[in-house]
Amino acid sequence: MTSLVDKAGSVRPGEELPVEPLKEWLRANIADLSGDPVITQYSGGASNWTYCLAFENKSVILRRPPAGTKAKGAHDMGREYRLQKALKPVYPKVPDMLGYTDDESVIGAEFYIMQKFDGIIPRQNMPRGFQISEADTRQLCESALDGLIDLHNVDYKAADLSHIGKGEGYTQRQISGWTNRYQKAKTWNVPRGRKVTDWLQDNMPSNEKICITHNDYRFDNLVLNAQNPQEIIGVLDWELATLGDPLMDLGNSLAYWVQADDDKVAKATRRQPSHLPGMMTRQEVIEYYCGKQGLKADDFAFYEVYGLFRLAAIAQQIYYRYHHKQTRNPAYKHIWFFVQYLMHRCRKVIKRSK
């Protein structure tokens, strides 16, 4: 299955790397890189720019923030690098960190270099020619959830990661923060959302557990072993990782989980192959996770609504930029409709929970 290994493509116009100063920095800071790199770029994602640098003896990954202004605390390459470096000894699915610099004179931005995992990334659809049985798909699904469970069970204090988030009070901060972001980004063609945000505020669980949370744990951020696709060998994109509540992290993952019997709108927005025969339904995901963690699975509505609303707020922030002509990307033109749909899903879960 080596032909199915995920590959980068051509570098997007305007996002080229200055090769000579980069080569000089790499030679001075990272050992065992032979020859000149062939540079390609990964097209997925709408946040940080990710490149593959293919040398004669091995390939490495470069991550840098996008061009232009950025929100305070966003696209912090140094934080992302240090977090993964500290997490690697206790969570081996993190790639090895090879080097970091905040010297923007090298390529025009801070960046870091990390290990490249050679494997299959399950994007919207599996790679062309990929075949997997229903039973093996079920095993893949369980492996993915086990990877999230393993992360949530890391002793972050022993790993010296207490500094990556504020911890206690996470639930309240998330509800207040995402409510505020949604209201600031609201445009005339999306709901006010008061019913949803008031319900979240009024139905916050009385207790919370604090652990390391990924906050973007999806199949397209996982790397599968090309020889044994049921095995997860890597977890990518730690930009949003923090200390938070594990069930809220699961709720974030479920917001992207489109199952086989979902409606046409959900299917049209699917970003991962969670619809394949053998994949769990959202309810089965909840029951599997809670069963493994010794939790009750009978009252998950708050976490499900939170995940959907958070995704709606993220989508609305993107649409706000398009609406106010801060970006002209035509892919963003109809995101307002997706926001409407997600808020509709929130209201349905709330109604079902009564």
Image: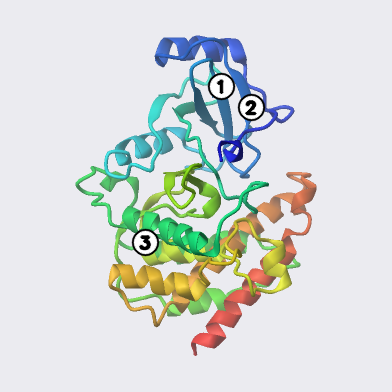
Q: Nearer the viewer, residue 150 or 244?
A: 150
Q: Is residue 16 found left or right of 208 in the rendered image?
A: right
Earlier residue among tags 1 and 2: 2
Gap between marks 3 and 2 measured at Cα: 38 Å
N-terminal-most mark, 3 or 1 = 1
**Residue drawn at 78 percent across, 44 percent down:** 328
The alpha-carbon separation of the residues under discs 3 and 1 comes to: 41 Å
Find residue 181 and report its horizontal and vertical position in percent: 56, 59
Q: CA distance from mark 1 to mark 2?
A: 8 Å
User: What residue do we see at 39% from left, 14% from top?
Assistant: 31
For the residue pair 318 and 122, the one nearer the viewer reads as: 122
> How is the protein colored in the picture?
rainbow
Q: Tell me the amino acid under the disc marked 2.
A: Thr
Badge 3 element: helix
Q: The N terminus appears in which quarter of the rendering?
A: top right
| Dot 3 crowding, Cα within 10 Å, few <14, some 14–19, many 20+ | some
Where is residue 310? Give x, y as percent.
Answer: 54, 63
Q: Is residue 280 left or right of residue 81?
A: right
Rendered image: mark on residue 40: 2
Q: Nearer the viewer, mark 3 or mark 1?
A: 1
Q: Position of residue 107 (x, y in %)?
A: 57, 20
In the rendered image, which residue does mark 1 sit on?
54
Q: Which residue is pictured at 47% across the width and 54% down the height?
A: 217
Residue 51 in sight from this viewpoint: yes
Between marks 3 and 2 in the image, the one whose residue lies nearer the viewer: 2
Marks 2 and 1: in contact by CB < 8 Å? yes
Label 3 close to label 1 by CB (< 8 Å): no
Q: Which residue is mark 3?
A: 170
Instruction: Inspect the image, locate mark 1, and give the three-letter code of the amino acid beneath it.
Output: Ala
Q: Relative to residue 302, is residue 234 depicted above or below?
A: above
Q: Position of residue 247 (x, y in %)?
A: 39, 67
